[in-house]
Image (tube, rainbow, N blue to C red):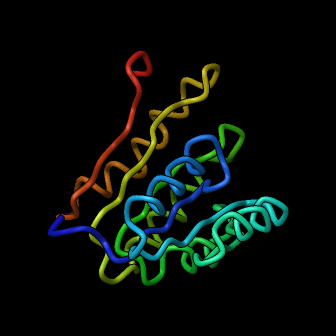
Amino acid sequence: MAGKPDSIAIFGASGRIGAPLAAHLRAMAPDVRLHLLSSSDAQAADLQLAFPSDTVAVADYLKLDDVKRAVKNTEAVFVVTPHFLNEQRAMENLVLALRETRGLKQVSWDTSPAPLLPKFLSLCATLVSAWLLSTSLPKRFWQPAGCR
């Protein structure tokens, strides 16, 4: 990726990975526009209080229009999903939305599976990484040691 992105969408911005990432980015890159996404109205309201200068939205991975709005006009996307989600439908929607995103430079994806859901990683990897690997986009897959 040539230089840092001007805008970053963070799925799961109120979660245990997304929240610290958003705080770090806000502190280290105050000029980057953050688009913080949560699946919950209450969590989105808390995010807006914590990040008043950033865009906050409720986005449901299972609703294609939500996902398209979430990634529209962003140059980078950070993806993390809750372990209870219908991963196949969610990742299909994400791939469809990313294909339509103009100016997308970077997709970072947290591949940390829930401890009791071994199919999580292979399903997501099949759907998302196959598409990402077929593009010229710079990409990063985050997976802690022990989850491989």
Q: In the rendered view, would you say 129 is above or below 70? A: above
Where is residue 36? Give x, y as percent.
59, 67
Q: Residue furthest right?
A: 42
Image quarter hosting the N terminus: bottom left
Is 90 placed left or right of 148 in the picture? right
Where is residue 20? Give x, y as percent.
55, 47
Where is residue 8? Give x, y as percent.
43, 69
Q: Residue furthest top?
A: 146
Tell me where residue 39 sits by quadrant.
Answer: bottom right
Image quarter hosting the C terminus: top left
**Number of callouts in the render?**
0
Q: Residue at x 61, y 28 (%)?
A: 114
Instruction: Please tell me which residue lies in front, 28 or 145.
Output: 28
Q: Residue at x 61, y 54 (%)?
A: 12
Tell me where residue 32 sits by quadrant.
Answer: bottom left
Where is residue 87? Give x, y as percent.
60, 47
Q: In the rendered view, would you say 21 is above or below 118? A: below
